[in-house]
Image: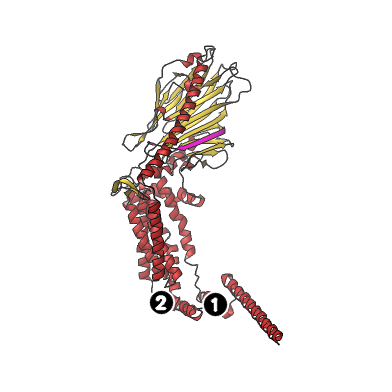
Amino acid sequence: MDKNTLVGVVLIGVVIVGFGIYNRPSQEERAQAQHYQDSIQQVIRQKEAEARKQAALAEEAALADTTSVFFGATQGEETFTTLENELVKLKLTNKGGRVCSATLKEYNDQKHQPLVLFDGEDASLNFSFDGKMENVNSGRMYFEAVNATDSTVTMRLKASNGGYLDFNYRLLPHSYMVDLTVQATGMQNFFSSTTRSMGIDWMQRARQMEKGFNFEQRYTSLTYKPVGDSFDYLSETSDEQKDVPEALDWVAFKNQYFSCVFMAGQSFMNASLDSKIEQQGSGYMKNYRAEMNTAFDPTGVQPTHLQFYFGPNHFKTLLASNDLSFTDKDQELEDLVYLGWPIIRLINRWFTINLFDWLSGMGLSMGIVILLMTIIVKILVLPTTWKSFISSAKMRALKPYVDKLNAKYPNPEDALKKQQETMSLYREYNVSPMGGCLPMLLQTPVYMALFFFVPNAIEFRQQSFLWADDLSAYDDLISWNMSLPLLGNHLSLFCLLFSATTVINQIVMMRQQDMGNNPQMAAMKWMMYIMPLMFFFIFNDYAAGLSYYYFISGLLSILTLWIMRKMTDEKKLLAQLEANKRDLSQQKPTGLMAKLEALQKEQERLQKERMERMKQTQNHNKNSNR
């Protein structure tokens, strides 16, 4: 890059940074803006609370009706029933007949206590039934727990006419799955003969489970699966409400590493889904709500079959849970672990996960597992890396000939002719300028697979390595109290090392390509140096395991290129190219060369016509002057 270009780029950077600093709001302005946003949120919450209060008052008024079939169930005292196995502990309340708490025994929260997905007022579940004379909402009714064991219980809602509604819960052994059947007995006179469905109103405030709020937010979303289709989800980064006309197999209130999934044997219909972002520091990530209908037989002949999954977003655990779900459906619960775009997902599903399970099964630390996985991936892509390197080496060997062509055609109007002769040169020596691109392109899905796998692998959660206490969150060995723009309140050392190796790698690649003194290439070099700086600000909040992987990958790339350079004698390579030189007079150009030759002929034809018109014009002017 020449001096003027360098000064220009630096000045542009100074202007951008200076403009950003000048226009940055003061601390007082930021406080006022935050106060304004807080006030808006407070007003919204007050309105929502008032609406809920009015609805509760109306419901209480309806419940006070002594003629109601379920009047006796409106009075009672809240009691709890526990279902548990070796994986999960569930607490059910007789008020509403629902699961009111879920604790995962094999996982801990950030305070190293057993992880609680929800409890207390964090979640609610209300079933609504339309009767002939009145409607029933389970949320405010007191059920009776009957036939309780360690893994089963029936929550029974009794009617004054001797009939009842049963919510039958069964926690499956050695799993995170819970079966629920809803069945009416002796309630034919209460319901209309046209009743075919019941309403569901499910709400939950998703707790912050991980160390980094911003990083966890990227993977926390209300996810759902339409029948016969792949999953979909609401926005992770903004509030979103969506009415879904399609029938749904399931709805999931998903965190980065844990999910509460509600599944329907007869599908959910007319779903209205809502996801709102909670404020950082509140202890919550999202406020979820799902309102929908599902099939219900008031005669009790056909029970309504439902299921819950309260557990980790672990790929093989979710895959096994599919077999415990409804036999006529493939729930595809494993989609809750996002493994990337289709081709990358296939690589992760059939290669990365199995490789990871094999290495982690040896009892190695997760940092060593990442190291070994990176080395194995580098070995697998080594043939394409070598092919790309040799292609670049051939281009460097031919550079003196290319420089002669550049000197032969210095004028811009000869650019097409220069390009044509350059391509002829490459064809003569059987060298493809794109020969290094395709191998590198083939490597990309493999590297991208690990980019998607590491942040979604729950096995890295709360696993320490070197100075990082949790490979699934940022490492903050260096931190401070105030939040700086773009940087936050910490410096991720693995991210810093990753950025540094990226700069070194870029330098090595530049020398490998030998871009010369071309000003345009020099500007490209400058941009490639800026990229690692951008990566640093982007990845500073990312999982330490991901930054560590890129750091190791960068080091191995530098080492691999250094070894390849030592193994390659470019003088011998040029001699080999000379020995294999082809006679182009006996060959017809094809592909890009043929197109360039056609363009060259077309350009010569147009230039000839232009010269003829100019001569005619000059002759006409001479005759006119006479």
Query: Helix, strand or loop at disc 1?
Result: helix
Give me the C-alpha separation between circle 2 and circle 1.
33 Å
Residue under pointer 2 = 572
Which residue is at 53% across, 31% downward?
A: 291
Q: Position of residue 47 (x, y in %)?
A: 47, 30
Colour mapping: secondary structure
Q: Position of residue 172 (x, y in %)?
A: 44, 30
**Can residue 426 be seen by looking at this rendering?**
yes
Above or below, 1 against 218 in this view is below
Above or below, 403 against 277 in this view is below
Q: Position of residue 223 (x, y in %)?
A: 49, 39
State which quadrant residue 609 falls in.
bottom right
Numbered tag placed on residue 414 in the rendering:
1
State which quadrant residue 104 falls in.
top left
Instruction: Locate the C terminus by quadrant.
Output: bottom right
Q: Amino acid at mark 1?
A: Asp
Of labels 2 and 1, earlier in sequence is 1
User: Magenta stretch?
Assistant: 270-283
Q: Mark 2 and 1 residues: CB-CB less than 8 Å, in contact?
A: no
Q: Is residue 103 left or right of residue 325?
A: left
Above or below, 390 against 339 in this view is below
Query: Helix, strand or loop at disc 2?
Result: helix
Q: Nearer the viewer, residue 610 or 530?
A: 610
Numbered tag placed on residue 573 in the rendering:
none
Q: Nearer the viewer, residue 184 or 257?
A: 257
State which quadrant residue 42 falls in.
top left
